[in-house]
Amino acid sequence: MATDTASVAKQAEISRHNGNVAFKKERLGAAIDAYTEAITLCPDVAVYWSNRALCYFKRKDWERVEQDCRNVIQLDGSSVKAFDLERSTNPDGDMVEDVWQALAKAKYLEWELSSSKRAWRLQKLKDECESALILHQSLQDPQSEDGSQASSDDKVDQFELLNEVFSKALEDDTPSEVPDYLCCNITLDIFQDPVITPSGFTYEKAVLLEHLEKVGNFDPITRQPLDKDELIPNLAIKGAARAFLKEHGWAYKTNPAF
């Protein structure tokens, strides 16, 4: 059984390789067929789905792009690891960056659906708690121990506390501002692949490379001379950005074209 599994995995990798070769030659139909074969053999490997999504992206087949991105998310929703794998094999390419918006949109839609469900459940629970509190107050002795009328302020405080508890529960699902340190100094969007320059500033890699190529070999902020070989991945910020996205799915909606 182990031998059979290894044989299937090997064949899937061969299909993936064939797809990569076809993709580089712009033979998108052949690439899609090869990646589809890999998916059929090993449907739980996220990178096969992401590779096929890139082909559909080139064809502008947005519906299929989103479908494949959703499968990537289901297989590896916490870190979008499949796209990191592609970046590691093609660090200067733009394939991964091209499909990021499609992936981010799918991830945002997934958050939006789950957020709506959570909000509905919390509202239902809040309504039940309020009804129970009203019933509890109505059953209380209207006279306190010293014979005075029970304070209406205490009753109001109980409802305010209840509202505070449920508002707190909804905080993670309430869109706000992404912390500045998690955003690129050029695009102001949350980082995908941050790099740090010798001057200590962090930028989105693809955006900074484009600046170096089209504008000049200097740091956009300090104006100091800068070469792409001096860029160092900022893994701490990358990890922090991924952790923030995991807890705040609304932050995937950073592009006004959504």
Image: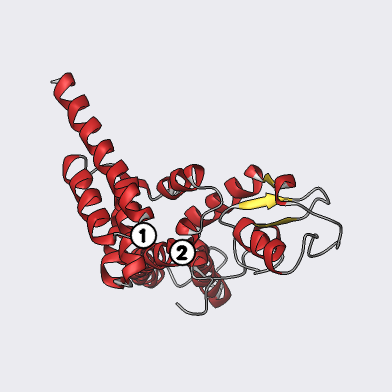
* Residue lying furthest front: 25
Residue that label 2 marks: 98
Contact between marks 2 and 1 (CB within 8 A): the answer is yes
Kind of element beneath mark 2: helix
Instruction: Assess disc 2: are there few (<14), some (14-19) or many (≥20) residues with their C-alpha within 10 Å of its C-alpha.
Output: few
Label drawn at residue 41:
none
- The answer to which of 186 and 113 lies nearer the viewer is 186
Residue drawn at (74%, 69%) of the image: 215
Kind of element beneath mark 1: helix
Image position, residue 247 (x, y; %) = 49, 55
Query: Is 246 on the left-hand or right-hand side of 179?
Result: left
* Residue lying furthest bottom: 257
Report the number of discs: 2
Instruction: Assess disc 1: are there few (<14), some (14-19) or many (≥20) residues with their C-alpha within 10 Å of its C-alpha.
Output: many
- The answer to which of 172 and 101 lies nearer the viewer is 101
Image position, residue 31 (x, y; %) = 27, 54
Image position, residue 216 (x, y; %) = 76, 65
Which residue type does callout 1 highlight?
Leu
- Spatial distance from mark 2 to mark 1, Cα to Cα? 8 Å
Residue drawn at (30%, 56%) of the image: 52
- Res. 30 visible in picture: yes
Seen in the picture, residue 47 relative to 29 is either above or below; the reply is: above
Residue that label 1 marks: 54
Q: Earlier in the sequence, mark 2 or mark 1?
A: 1
Quadrant where the N terminus lies? Answer: top left
- Res. 179 visible in picture: no
